[in-house]
Image (tube, grey):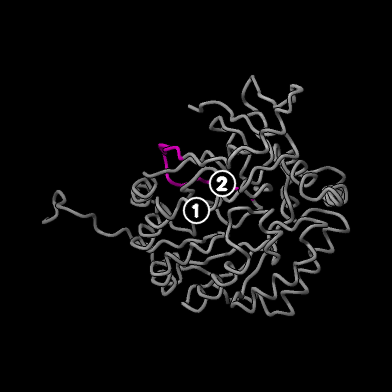
Amino acid sequence: MPDGLAVSPGPGLPRKGRGALSNPAVRFESTAREAFDDGWGSLEALADLPPLPTTLIREKSRSAMAWNDSPDIGFDRSLNPYRGCEHGCVYCYARPSHAYVGYSPGLDFETKLLFKPDLPALLEKELRKPGYQARPVALGANTDPYQPVERTLLITRQVLEVLDRFSHPVTIVTKSAGVLRDLDILQRMAARRLVHVCVSVTTLDAALARKMEPRAATPGRRLEAIRQLNAAGVPAGVLAAPMIPGLNDAELERILSASAAAGAQRAGYVLLRLPLEIRQLFEEWARAHFPDRAARILALVRETRGGRMYDSRFGQRQTGTGIYADMLANRFKVAITRLGMNKAGVGGQGLDCSLFAPPAEAGPRQLALL
């Protein structure tokens, strides 16, 4: 069970190496904690605290795959080795899910990370179930499968080893160059058309990236990951996401061009989404880091969401509505046409599901000689 919400600095006091500025109350809890100034400069003192440490929490999983029927995404099943993400992207759409386990979507999301050591074993068991039909599974659809803790825990690598043995197709989305550590497995799978990698690039400005994604790989390292993956025969595209009106959306064409130059043949983009607690977290973050243009950024966000901060309707969540959103969509179409991206039949599309075959189980089996 959670050990309570961390006492965090109030809005406007960033913590070194972290994205969120606060710890909003868990929406399912009856009590909440709020920082306040007692007149003795207590809030100012919080700003001088050392960086918040990362705590790893073992989570016992009941099943490996998460299933969905959303018309907005191109997969019906996913695997998530981790819950929470140390990259610290303040806009991360997965933040609200931390409340389901009793932690805040704010700083808790970045510092209290749940990991699933039994995920590979559970996955193998599920893939062996009679009647299972293989379709591409999304690895890390909720939080990044290659966040920093993967260096030591290696759960993502173990999951890929299972998928490789079963010849099961997989798609990967990450903003980490750590994906290159598994290049040996990815090459084997790519040779059978079983894998496609999508690297998220939000900006080419390293200083802006540090504010947006404090513990993620630099933009240059992500582009290099795209280059090395494609050079090794592993199809890797780019996801320009999220595009934040008035902040990084002007870079859309440059991101696509740089990614195409690195070998990416497929591309996508997603407009900023601010469901539930993310709205408060993003507003705090924008006003703290960009006080001169925060009001403009927030106004443009509302313009793309019908006057609100978020519109959850299917078909609109990813791209928004209105003149500004339409302009962004048109810019994307023009850019990928000019760059020759997203052509039918190239860039890792059409992963092969026909090769799926559970391998023989290790050890003696009953009736093996009959």
User: Is residue 301 magenta-colored?
Assistant: no
Q: Label 2: which residue?
A: 68
Instruction: Give the left or right position of residue 362, taking residue 280 as reference.
Output: left
Q: Earlier in the sequence, mark 2 or mark 1?
A: 2
- Tell me, for residue 337, which label it has, or none: none
User: Do labels 2 and 1 touch, CB within 8 Å?
Assistant: no
Q: Say what secondary structure mark 1 lies in.
A: loop
Q: Residue furthest top?
A: 30
Instruction: Give the left or right position of residue 176, taking residue 128 as reference.
Output: right
Q: Position of residue 342 (x, y in %)?
A: 65, 73
Packing grade of label 1 (10 A; few <14, some 14-19, many >=20) is some
Packing grade of label 2 (10 A; few <14, some 14-19, many >=20) is few
Q: Nearer the viewer, residue 118 or 109?
A: 109
Instruction: Give the left or right position of residue 317, taking residue 102 as reference.
Output: right
Q: Nearer the viewer, mark 2 or mark 1?
A: 1
Residue 40's image quarter? top right
Hey, what amino acid is under mark 2?
Answer: Asn
Q: Is residue 312 something one can see in this rendering?
A: no
Q: Position of residue 206 (x, y in %)?
A: 67, 63
Q: Say what secondary structure mark 2 lies in.
A: loop
Q: Nearer the viewer, residue 342 or 15?
A: 15
Q: Position of residue 170 (x, y in %)?
A: 47, 61
Note whether 252 is above or below 233 in the view shown: above
Q: Label 1: which residue?
A: 148
Residue 187's image quarter? bottom left
Q: Main secondary structure of the magenta part?
A: loop
Q: Which residues are drawn in magenta?
A: 56-70
